C-alpha cells in the first residue's frame, strides 16, 4: 500500500512561549507516513517569528494579518495536499507515535473518513491535570453515537484527523463561529460517517486560565448547544440532555476556576 501523507496546520498568534514545544512535538513524529507541516501565523509581535525562523527549512510558515483563528485554519486546510489532514493549535502538542497511530488506523480502515483518540490535559508547565475530564472523554469516545455527540462535544480536537477529500462535501470551518467551530465540523463529519476511535493517547491539550478555551468556556458551551440544535435529530429528550449537560459543565468549570483563583491567593 502507498504511504499515507499527513498534512497538519498550526494556527498561531503571539504564542512564543508555547509554539516551540508544539513544533517540536510534530517534527519528532516517526512512522510509516509522509508529513506536510505548516504554521499559519497572524502577524505575531511577541517573538514567535524568531522561534519560527530558528527552525530553518524544517517548517513551512507564513506570517501576515488574518481574520482570526478560524481564518488561519481555513487558509491552512485549503492549502494542504495530504491524504489526511488536521490542525494542532500553537499551545497543544502531539504525543510520541501519534501520527504513526493515525496513519495505521487509516491504513487498516480504508473506508473510514475520520479518526480521533484519547487526550491528555496539561498545564503551562506540561504537567497532567484534570485527569477526570480525560477519563470521561475517553469513556464517551468509546461509546460514540450521533445522538450522544449532539448532547456534548467529547471529541478532543487536537486528536482528530480526517481525509482531505471530505471537505468537498462537508465544507470548511464556519467563520461565524469563534469558539465551537471544531464541534460544528465534527457534527458534519459524524453525520457523514462514524469515526474510528484510537485507544492510545494521541495529543495534549493545554489548559490555562488565559487560553481561549479556558477563558471562554461558558460561551463555547452556549455556541455548541446552538449548533447541535440545528440538527433535526435533536429531539425533545436529546435537547433536554443538552440543556442539563450545559448547566453541569458550566457550573463545574466555574467552580474549578474559583478554586484555582483561591489557591493562587494563598
Image (cartoon, grey):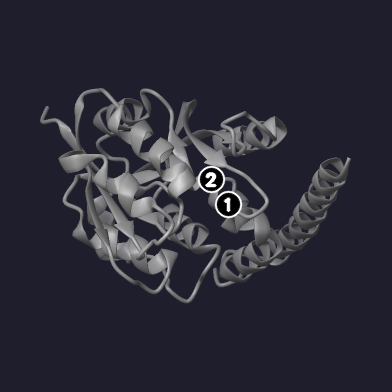
**Label 1, label 2: how many angstroms apart (C-alpha)?**
8 Å
Residue 196 seen by the camera: no
Task: Work out whether 114 lies above or below 244.
Answer: above
Q: Quadrant of residue 28?
A: top left
Residue at position x 25%, y 23% in the image? 31
Q: Horizontally, is 95 left or right of 218 in the view?
A: left
Q: Is residue 237 positioned above or below 16 on the image? A: below
User: Of 101 and 76, which appears nearest the observer?
Assistant: 76
- Residue 260 can be seen in this image: yes
Query: In front of the other: label 1 or label 2?
Result: 2
Identify the mark at residue 149; answer none if there is no mark. Answer: 1
Residue 36 appears in which quarter of the rendering? top left
The quarter in which the C terminus is drawn is top right
Residue 11 image position (x, y, % from top left):
37, 56
Question: Which residue is identified by label 2?
Answer: 155
Taking the image as shown, residue 26 lies to the left or right of residue 219, namely left
Mark 1 lies on a secondary structure that is: helix
**Residue at x 56% of width, y 69% of height:** 227
Amino acid at each position: 500500500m502507498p504511504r499515507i501523507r499527513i498534512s497538519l496546520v498550526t494556527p498561531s498568534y503571539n504564542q512564543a512561549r508555547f509554539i516551540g514545544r508544539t513544533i517540536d512535538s510534530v517534527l519528532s513524529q516517526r512512522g510509516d507516513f509522509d508529513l506536510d507541516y505548516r504554521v499559519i501565523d497572524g502577524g505575531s509581535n511577541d517573538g514567535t517569528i524568531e522561534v519560527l525562523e530558528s527552525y530553518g527549512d524544517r517548517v513551512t510558515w507564513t506570517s501576515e494579518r488574518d481574520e482570526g483563528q478560524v481564518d488561519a485554519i481555513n487558509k491552512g486546510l485549503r492549502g494542504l495536499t495530504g491524504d489526511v489532514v488536521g490542525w494542532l493549535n500553537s499551545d497543544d502538542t502531539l504525543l510520541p507515535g501519534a501520527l504513526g497511530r493515525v496513519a495505521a488506523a487509516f491504513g487498516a480502515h480504508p473506508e473510514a473518513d475520520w479518526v480521533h483518540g484519547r487526550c491528555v490535559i496539561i498545564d503551562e508547565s506540561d504537567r497532567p491535570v484534570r485527569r477526570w475530564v480525560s477519563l470521561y472523554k475517553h469513556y464517551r469516545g468509546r461509546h460514540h453515537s450521533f445522538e450522544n455527540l449532539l448532547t456534548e462535544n467529547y471529541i478532543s480536537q487536537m486528536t482528530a484527523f480526517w481525509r482531505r477529500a471530505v471537505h468537498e462535501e462537508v465544507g470548511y470551518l464556519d467563520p461565524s463561529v469563534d469558539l465551537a467551530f471544531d464541534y460544528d465540523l465534527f457534527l458534519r463529519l459524524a453525520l457523514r460517517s462514524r469515526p474510528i476511535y484510537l485507544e492510545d493517547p494521541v495529543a495534549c491539550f493545554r489548559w490555562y486560565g488565559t487560553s481561549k478555551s479556558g477563558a471562554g468556556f461558558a460561551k463555547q458551551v452556549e455556541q455548541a448547544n446552538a449548533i447541535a440544535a440545528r440538527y433535526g435529530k435533536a429531539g425533545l429528550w436529546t435537547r433536554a440532555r443538552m440543556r442539563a449537560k450545559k448547566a453541569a459543565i458550566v457550573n463545574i468549570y466555574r467552580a474549578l476556576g474559583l478554586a484555582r483563583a483561591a489557591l493562587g491567593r494563598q
